Image (tube, rainbow, N blue to C red):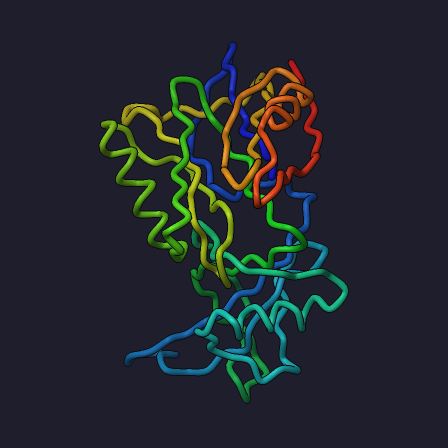
Amino acid sequence: MIGRAVLYHEEEEHWAGAISATETPAAHFEPQVAILCETGSGSGKGQAYHAQYMTEQGKWATDVNSKVTCLKDKMDILDYCKKVYPKRDVTNIVEASHYLKVPNWCKVGHKKCKVSRWVKPFRCLEGPFQSDALLVPENCLFDHIHNQTKCWEFSKWNLTASQSCQDRDMQLRSFAMLLPCGISLFSGVEFVCCPKHLKDRPRGHFRFILFHRFTCCGEFYFHLYSTFQLALESCERCKPSAWGCHKRENHYPLSDD
């Protein structure tokens, strides 16, 4: 498994605002589903709402033809992802790292869809797992925690990453799951810690670096290399074992824009 991190190099301009762990270009489509489960009293509480899914045009669509409403079992959510994206190779799900305001929720049995709610969608992951590329501003720290004996949900890894940053007297800026070990279960997390006073966000020039993440002879490695070939040569030096050597060849461009 090979991935990347993105290091920001600030020049003339500064940042203002926060970055989500799943921030992607607007033109990039990612399969997602949104489930609304409301309980309690008050207006709209306890009502059943049709599930929604993301269209390739980047808009949320209500699945009025389905009876799917409040799904809580992760396998059911995975099955729903496969149903609404039948042409895609959906293999797993992961909870989004931030809340989104999703509009036009439709109550079951009602034609008007005017309700908006803040929810955490589920991302429908396709094909072999690849963790997200995280943005690493200057003066921030990129790190990871990987433990094959731990098979935890998203929320527990979130807390683990946050605590690791706090132990460094820093704050968690972004994070992503590593190495799935079940349906919406993972055996590690990668994350970015930043100084607590860091509030700026670069809007100008930045550059990419290569961050290669791979498995070799049953072990998990993180390495920072100037070229893709150096990462592969490092893996080749690992002697074959009972598990064998496995590596995925993904190329990421090096840019000095």
What residue do we see at 45% from left, 58% from top?
185
Pick the front one: 191 or 105: 191
* Residue 74: image location, x then y, percent: 48, 69
Q: Quadrant of the N terminus?
A: top right
| Left or right: residue 177 compared with residue 257 | left
- For the point 38% across and 35% down, which residue is it? 173
**In the rendered image, the vertical position of residue 242 relative to residue 232, given as above or below:** below
Quadrant of the rendering where the C terminus is positioned? top right
Farthest residue in the bottom direction? 109
Above or below — where is 46 with respect to 205?
A: below
Residue 112, above or below 205 = below
Quadrant in which residue 3 is drawn: top right
- Along the viewing direction, whichever of 59 and 149 lies nearer the viewer: 149
Which residue lies at the image location 46% right of the left edge and 71% below the top edge? Answer: 36
Q: Is residue 97 above or below residue 140?
A: below
Residue 236, given in percent of the width and then of the height, sits at 64, 27
Please provide percent x and percent y for residue 64: 63, 80
| Residue 47 on image: x %, y % | 42, 83
Q: Residue at x 57, y 68 (%)?
A: 78
